[in-house]
Amino acid sequence: MRKQIVAGNWKMNKTFSEGIDLINQIIEKSSSVKDVQLIVAPPSILTNEAAKYLENKNIGLAGQNCANHSQGAYTGEVSAAMLKSAGANYVILGHSERRAFYHETDEKIREKIKLCLENNLRPIVCCGEVLKERENNEHFEIVAKQIKGMFEGISAEEFKNVIIAYEPVWAIGTGKTATPEQAQEIHQFIRETIKNSYGSEIANNLSILYGGSCKPSNAKELFTKPDVDGGLIGGASLNADDFIAIANSF
Ligand code: PEP
């Protein structure tokens, strides 16, 4: 059966020493977590050092983004191969902040997905609508379009390594959370969409995470929904107790 996953997206937070401190707190507290894959996504400057602390700890390590080129004259970028060589095994791709602030398109995200898969990194691929689209009842259409654009040309064999995160943009960092019913409805739709492209076995094995102001006080009711397989956590992942409490909410 599909894996339950709780992944922490630290975004651009924590200095080097603060980051290592948080990694160590998470390691220490993670002994209470059973049958849930924890993943941490620190800023890329911390990836290699975090990998040393996480060795043999059964906590995944993710990049927050990677370049859409394999190497070359792309100042400031970090490639999938670099993340892999630094010890990462996952990469968050297509986060709404990347789409909004760095103009990432579904096509660009698809290039990144390909590079991650070629480098044996599992992509955690984000989708989700903005507030206006939700108010206009366009969220299904938007998510379907994002999924089509991001996974076009990705084979079933490749897709087996993909994780999807549904993150309604209006819920990210706003304190507003999708209701468990809203989350279930669209997660089910995502699974159905994947089933239509890749078949039911792959769709049933796909972990679909919810992201958007998920915290210890609301994780339990979200995670009871059958198509919600965990969370991609922003703000609450910066506190080890909250992050672990979310993982213990299944
Ligand atoms: C995110 O950015 O992926 C996220 C879900 O953030 P937050 O939990 O802070 O809303």
Image (spheres, rainbow, N blue to C red):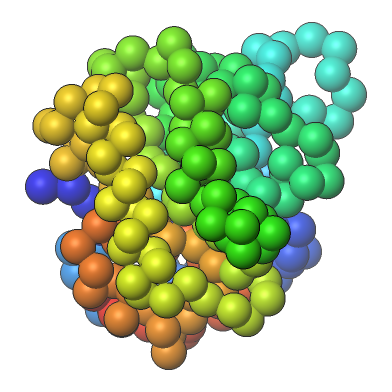
Asked whether the viewer can see residue 84, the reply is no
Q: How many marks overall?
A: 0
In the displayed structure image, the side of residue 178 where residue 200 appears, left or right = left
Residue 134: x %, y % from top left = 58, 60
Query: Which of 87/176 is in front?
Result: 176
Residue 201 falls in which quadrant of the image?
Answer: top left
In the picture, the quarter occupied by the C terminus is bottom left
What's the residue at 19%, 40% (across, down)? 205
Query: Which of 61/161 is in front?
Result: 161
Residue 189: x %, y % from top left = 33, 47
Above or below — where is 88 with respect to 68?
below
Residue 107 falls in which quadrant of the image?
Answer: top right
* Residue at the farthest bottom position: 217
Asked whether the viewer can see residue 228, the reply is yes
What's the residue at 40%, 49% (across, down)? 60
Residue 140: x %, y % from top left = 46, 47
What's the residue at 55%, 50% (across, down)? 138
Above or below — where is 64 with respect to 112?
below
In the displayed structure image, the side of residue 248 where residue 216 appears, left or right = right
Above or below — where is 41 with respect to 148?
below
What's the residue at 25%, 27% (across, down)? 196
In the displayed structure image, the side of residue 36 where residue 51 appears, left or right = right
Residue 8: x %, y % from top left = 51, 62
